[in-house]
Amino acid sequence: MEKVLRKRAWRDLKENKFRYFALAFLIIISMYLVISLVGAADTIVDGTTKQAKKHKLEDGQFQVFVPLTTKQKENFTKKGLTVEETFYLDFRQKDGSKLRIFKNRKKVNKINLDEGRLAKNKSEVVVEKRYAQEHNLKTGSKITIDGNFYKITGIGSVPDYDACYEKLSDSTVDSKQFGLAFVTEDAYENLKDNENSIQSEEYIYAYRLNGAMTQKQLKNKLKKITFNPDDVDDPYFKDYWEETAGKKDDIKDGIKKLTDASTQMSDGLNKLSENNETLQKGANQIFQAYLKTAESQLTSFGVTSLTENNYANILKSLIAKSSDGLTRLSLESAKEQL
């Protein structure tokens, strides 16, 4: 039986050899593609990790409204952290693209040069490699930024922009419309002083923890940093502050005035309460004086004694008995006064 099955299998293979050959070929190709992709991914991850370590990739970054003071920065460095400014300015190029300008990095997110060298004077610049490719820029060529010519001395990349997104919310990289450039500190200050950037300077700090503390501990320290709103130059922030904190101050002033007025009213009520008995005595004395005056005027009507208990009935009786209109009017007036 086994011999028959073996012969049938060989016969089936011979009759359908092209089909089985194609199937085997597809299996081999599929395995090759899977192994190649896994190997490529592993190579990319390993290469990225090595480059990140070599060029001091940040552990994170934070943004502030005004630059940190020297003392504030020292508070971080004394704890063992490495902190570096990664401030930037955005400029619109003639072709409509946006170029983000940084100072040369020294400690964190250092520039990885594919060719050339770093900028050394005010008229030199390093351009991010994908932007350079899209705009046909090469080492030694010229580029215009804010109306000034710069010589490209190097082309490279930085680890914090391994995917060159303009904003973290972007879903795709468009190096035709957005790129990076790195200049000397003097060149950066000149660009900032010209005040022609698309928006105000962004104050961002990159940091490496170096095992000195955790992200949570750093976050708690950052929450304690205070600043003076008057030191902020950003007009958008000033408008925001005026709309929020400004109104908050107005509300606080209003509450304070209301509290002060409430305190004064409370003091007045307390004084009134304390002098209530005196006021009652004074009112009673005035009333008794009115009664005496009325009594003296009514003696001609036979009234001998006018008291708090009987004055209303006596006056009512006299008004009813009086036939003289003028007299009745006088009696009614006396009753109303009492």
Image (tube, rainbow, N blue to C red):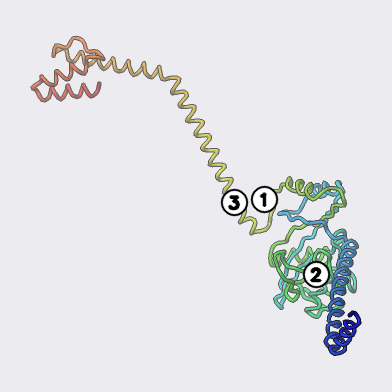
| Picture disc at residue 229 | 1
- Image quarter (top left, top right, bottom left or bottom right) of the C terminus: top left
| Chain-order first, disc 2 or disc 3 | 2
Q: Is residue 271 above or below residue 120?
A: above
Q: Is residue 119 visible?
A: no
Closest to the camera, between mark 1 and mark 2, is: 2
| Picture disc at residue 181 | 2
| Chain-order first, disc 1 or disc 2 | 2
Please indicate whether residue 230 sits to the left or right of residue 260 in the image. right
Q: Residue furthest front?
A: 1
- Residue found at x 40% / y 17%: 278
Callout 3: 10 Å neighbours few (<14), some, many (20+)?
Answer: few
Q: Position of residue 281 (x, y in %)?
A: 36, 16
Residue bearing the label numbered 3: 244
Q: Is residue 268 visible?
A: yes
Kindly identify the amino acid type of the residue bearing the numbered disc 2. Answer: Ala
Q: Position of residue 11 (x, y in %)?
A: 87, 88
- Residue found at x 75% / y 54%: 67
Q: Is residue 41 above or below residue 273?
A: below
Q: Is residue 336 above or below residue 65?
A: above
Please indicate whether residue 256 sits to the left or right of residue 157 in the image. left
Q: CA distance from mark 3 to mark 1?
A: 12 Å
